[in-house]
Image (cartoon, rainbow, N blue to C red):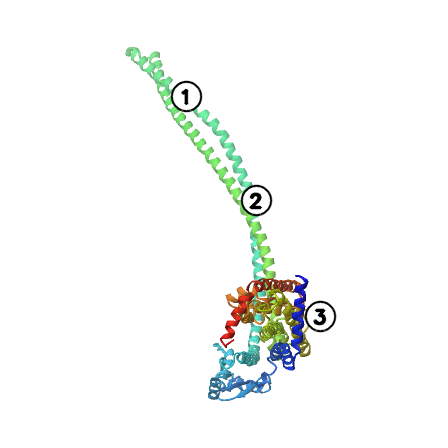
């Protein structure tokens, strides 16, 4: 940029300042432009300062139809008690009417909302002490059409009635519960005695199991001793069986030899008898023959006896072998019995030990349970004597929610202030750029660049003045300001950048730029998370959120007002400065190329007589 360009820019600035004070009307208009945006912000913040502070003028209708009920020969009427308490509640303007008046009034919009206490209200409350309890119901009627905010306020009134009603029910439950607690106390005391008795019986049974285990162990030792004797005898029988088998074989062989010799003797006797002359028989020869015959007969008997002996010896050998095998089986069985008896003895000992442990643990547990039940019975006895109001409060709210507030505000107005302050600065920039012409280089001695920067100063000064008025109003109104210096800096910077952005759009694009500025205003009201969380907005606003200048401006103002978290503040500051610089660069490029086309477009609009 040459010295001539700078001189021309300064010349344009001087002309603007001179024109600003040329007459009172101009001054008045400029002052109005400076003040108007701040009013937009401060009046909206004031309106939202404490939306629940004046709800005592909001009418809320109540129709009490409750006919009451009896409990323990006492008459109760929950509806009347509720009405009595609401008359002392100044949060809303309670109007007590008939059911028909309530329905007609809410339907027509005379009342924003109303509640009908049904005729069986007390009866349903009393049913809690019966076998068939029934929930008490209250009819809440609200006219949503009448006012979107009023319906939310009346929800608070309905909640107040609901809480009061619940408190009444809890108080009644306390009275009904005391009798049940007394019955429970008696039952626990009886149960404690039964548990104690059962523990003693369990201990006795365990001792019996232990004694039986000792007997099993002693029998197992005797059986082991006998089993060893059977095993030793079986071994001796097996040893003798071999000798018996050998003897049986010898007897059998000898019996065969005797039988052969007997046959020879018998044959010789027969031969002798046949060869002797019968005439010679009397005398000595007869004696020899008779002797040989007797010998033959005796040898035959000897052969038969030896054969019987041989067969008997074989049977003896076979029997001794079976006896040996049987003795072995007996010994093996005896060993199995001994092993089994040993396992039985060990199992019996384990059973005895387990029974003792069971006896000790279970009995101790039962005695402890009995003691606990006895203690519970005593505790319930103490509970039945506590203060009913304290117990009612505990039962109604046994758990309390501890709320910790980070960056708290003293009023709702301070919470919404960042949004309305930033919004007013955007509106102020649009109004300023619409009321004051950004200028065009067409048919002048100035270049587009000189015209852009020459006019820019006036708009920046207007932005600073608008910011100063808004900042002053925030202090006067009493908005919570955590860091005053950072708030002043942030508000001023936001105002200047918004002014540069809108001025650049209109300077470069003329009427099209004005349209873009208004469109951005509309989109940013819902798309920057100023009031409602961006997460609950539509997909369009979620997509636009990161690209909207007000997104970062609101973050900067919020951090400076309600407590700075630098990780939020610094990125927003850098992005907003980047938007400002990028806008200036693009505006200069566009104005250099399209200034004449933009001017031509505006002239055609002016010729229509509508713009």
The reply, left or right, for residue 399 in relation to residue 291 is right
Please state, as top left, top right, bottom left or bottom right, where the N terminus lies in the image.
Answer: bottom right
> Going from the N terminus, do you reach mark 1 or mark 3 first?
1
* Mark 2 lies on residue: 221
The crowding category of the residue bearing disc 2, from other C-alpha atoms within 10 Å (few below 14, some 14 to 19, many at least 20), is: some
Task: Classify residue 289 by image quadrant.
Answer: top left
Res. 16 in view: yes
> Going from the N terminus, do you reach mark 2 or mark 1 first?
2
* Mark 1 lies on residue: 253
- Looking at the picture, how far across and down is residue 321, in whole percent? 45, 31
Which element type, helix, strand or loop, lies under badge 3?
Answer: helix
Which element type, helix, strand or loop, lies under badge 2?
Answer: helix
> Do the numbered discs 1 and 3 sit on residues whose CB atoms are within 8 Å?
no
Q: Residue at x 59, y 61 (%)?
A: 363
Above or below, comparing residue 255 to residue 160 in the picture: above
Q: Residue at x 65, y 72 (%)?
A: 458
* Mark 3 lies on residue: 485
> Do the numbered discs 2 and 1 sit on residues whose CB atoms are within 8 Å?
no
Q: Residue furthest right?
A: 485
């Amino acid at each position: 940029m040459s010295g001539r360009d700078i001189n021309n820019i300064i010349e344009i600035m001087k002309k603007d300042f001179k024109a600003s004070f040329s007459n009172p009307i101009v001054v008045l208009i400029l002052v109005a432009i400076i003040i108007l945006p701040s009013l937009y912000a401060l009046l909206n913040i004031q309106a939202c300062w404490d939306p629940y502070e004046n709800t005592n003028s909001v009418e809320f209708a109540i129709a009490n139809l409750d006919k009451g009920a009896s409990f323990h020969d006492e008459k109760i009427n929950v509806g009347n008690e509720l009405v009595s308490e609401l008359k002392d509640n100044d949060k809303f303007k309670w109007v007590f009417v008939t059911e028909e008046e309530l329905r007609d009034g809410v339907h027509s919009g005379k009342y924003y909302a109303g509640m009908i206490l049904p005729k069986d209200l007390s009866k349903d409350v009393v049913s809690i002490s019966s076998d068939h309890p029934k929930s008490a119901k209250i009819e809440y009627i609200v006219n949503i059409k009448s006012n979107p905010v009023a319906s939310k306020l009346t929800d608070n009134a309905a909640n107040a009635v609901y809480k009061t009603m619940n408190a009444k029910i809890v108080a009644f439950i306390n009275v009904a519960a005391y009798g049940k607690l007394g019955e429970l106390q008696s039952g626990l005391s009886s149960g404690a005695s039964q548990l104690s008795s059962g523990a003693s019986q369990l201990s006795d049974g365990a001792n019996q199991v232990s004694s039986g285990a000792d007997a099993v162990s002693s029998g197992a030792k005797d059986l082991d001793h006998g089993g060893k004797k059977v095993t030793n005898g079986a071994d001796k029988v097996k040893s003798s069986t071999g000798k018996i088998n050998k003897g049986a074989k010898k007897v059998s062989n000898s019996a065969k030899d005797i039988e052969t010799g007997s046959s020879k003797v018998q044959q010789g006797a027969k031969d002798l008898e046949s060869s002797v002359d019968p005439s010679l028989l009397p005398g000595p020869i007869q004696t020899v023959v008779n002797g040989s015959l007797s010998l033959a007969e005796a040898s035959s008997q000897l052969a038969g006896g030896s054969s019987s002996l041989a067969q008997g010896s074989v049977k003896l050998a076979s029997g001794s072998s079976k006896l040996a095998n049987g003795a072995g089986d007996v010994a093996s069985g005896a060993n199995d019995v001994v092993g089994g008896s040993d396992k039985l003895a060990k199992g019996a000992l384990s059973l005895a030990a387990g029974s003792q442990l069971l006896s000790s643990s279970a009995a101790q547990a039962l005695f402890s349970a009995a003691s606990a039940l006895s203690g519970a019975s005593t505790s319930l006895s103490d509970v039945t004597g506590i203060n009913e109001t304290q117990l009612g409060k505990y039962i109604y709210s046994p758990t309390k929610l501890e709320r910790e507030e980070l960056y708290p505000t003293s009023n709702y107005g301070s919470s919404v202030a960042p949004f309305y302050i930033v919004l007013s600065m955007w509106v102020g920039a649009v109004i300023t750029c619409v009321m004051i012409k950004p200028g065009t280089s067409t048919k002048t001695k100035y270049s587009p660049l000189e015209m852009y920067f020459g006019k820019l100063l006036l708009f920046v000064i207007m932005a600073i003045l608008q910011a100063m008025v808004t900042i002053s109003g925030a202090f006067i109104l009493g908005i919570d300001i955590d860091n005053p210096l950072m708030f002043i800096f942030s508000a001023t910077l936001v105002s200047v950048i918004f002014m540069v952005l809108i001025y650049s759009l209109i300077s470069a694009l003329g009427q099209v730029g004005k349209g873009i500025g208004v469109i951005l205003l509309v989109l940013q009201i819902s798309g920057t998370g100023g009031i409602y969380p961006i997460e609950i907005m539509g997909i369009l606003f979620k997509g636009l959120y990161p690209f909207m200048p007000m997104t970062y401006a609101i973050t900067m103002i919020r951090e400076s007002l309600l407590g700075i978290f630098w990780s939020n503040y610094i990125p927003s500051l850098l992005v907003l400065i980047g938007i400002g610089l990028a806008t200036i660069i693009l505006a200069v490029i566009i104005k250099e190329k399209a200034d004449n086309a933009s001017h031509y477009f505006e002239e055609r609009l002016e010729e229509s007589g509508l713009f």
